[in-house]
Image (spheres, helix red, strand yellow):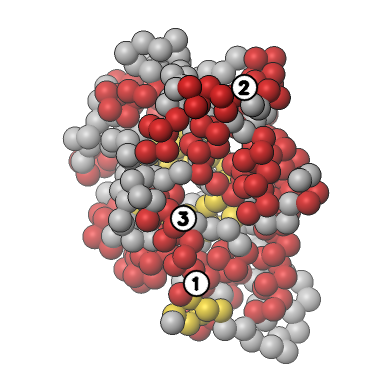
Amino acid sequence: MLLKQCYNFHDFRKLARKRLPGPIFNYIDGGADDEVTLRRNTEAFNQCDLVPRVLQGVKDIDLSVDVMGTKLQLPVYCSPTALQRLFHHQGEYAVAAAAEKFGTMFGVSSLGTVSMEDIAQQFNTPQVYQFYFHKDRGLNNAMMERAKASGIDIMMLTVDSITGGNRERDLRTGFSIPFRLNLAGLWQFVSKPMWGINYVTHEKFSLPQLQAHVDMGGGTSSIGDYFTNMLDPSMDWDDVADMVKRWDGQFCLKGIMSVEDAKKAVDIGCTGIVISNHGGRQLDGSRSSFDHLAEIVDAVGDQIDVLFDGGVQRGTHVLKALALGAKAVGVGRMYLYALAAAGQPGVERALTLMKAEIERDMRLMGCHSVRELQRNHVRFR
């Protein structure tokens, strides 16, 4: 299969599987425990049907949205994800370049493989910094100051990952950073030699946001121990309220899954929330993100910008989320498979296809602008 033969999410996934060693593909592909929530995230869209209007004279389509003080030209943004240069040697550089081309938002992760400063200097696209809360409060403050100095637009604190999820696919292959592979995992790397050649002939793999705090050589602070030893499970609303005050700008909580927590985010001064269950990678058995969207929008949508991610594979999924009140929709695996398949051209093709789907579906829905999408455009079964 070639890149030009990829027409949807599933095609990019197949090509990524051919290009990546099994342990790395499964790191992207997998979820927690029995992966019930992972599957449910996409299946939930099937319980919601679109209701089109006809004869609306739709000629031009406006896909722009306003999110936390920033205008995006596309209602889809690239969610922050970790370890991107493991999937393709271009990593975050490729994703940021594609996001800039489409005028949408891109997020650098605390576990990103390119520094936030490099991305901010090289690309003119709205940027978020996806932050994990550490036991070391001094480290938290220093990283926030670094993000502020870099010109990051939006601080995005992940609140559903105070400990790592039980990702059994990784346990079976021995996947970790640094690599500690079993024999089956090692064979997967041997069988994909081009990945290995690219890995050793390009910029050395690192975690610039955390390189002073995580031992990439395999010491006690390796990535395998990062979530367990460095993140603070005692983080509470008072801690986050203090962060919001210190940041004094656009501040978003990623991982909100209840009306009660959404209201608390409003109370402490957040300007945005992301309804998200971490792609089904944390608490298995939780509801899909989509199942929570309408009730959270009804509760706080007039007070805070509500973003959404989880299971998005199609333009119609985006329209359904927007119709329920999401300001914008994040994608993760969709662009990661494309990145693994072909680097920047892959991410650009994925976003091109997504934009084309949304524009075509908007015409079929009889809507000129994404802001016209309302509850009367959907019905639940």
Q: Amino acid at mark 1?
A: Asn
Residue 286 position in % (x across, y down): 31, 57
> Between marks 3 and 1, how big is the CA–CA gap?
14 Å
Q: Residue at x 62, y 40 (%)?
A: 17
Q: Earlier in the sequence, mark 2 or mark 3?
A: 2
Left or right, residue 301 beside residue 243 = right
Q: Amino acid at mark 2?
A: Val
Left or right, residue 136 beside residue 169 = left
Residue 69 position in % (x across, y down): 52, 51
In the image, residue 56 sits, relative to residue 24, either above or below, namely: below
Q: Residue at x 53, y 70 (%)?
A: 320
Residue 260 position in % (x across, y down): 24, 60
Q: Which residue is mark 2?
A: 190
Left or right, residue 190 beside residue 40 = right
Q: Which residue is mark 1?
A: 46
Secondary structure state at the residue bearing disc 2: helix
Residue 360 visible: yes
Residue 118 visible: no
Left or right, residue 104 beside residue 173 = right
> Between marks 2 and 1, how big is the CA–CA gap?
40 Å
Q: Give the label, 2 or 3, closer to the camera.
A: 2
Residue 310, which numbered label? 3
Q: Quadrant of residue 362?
A: bottom right
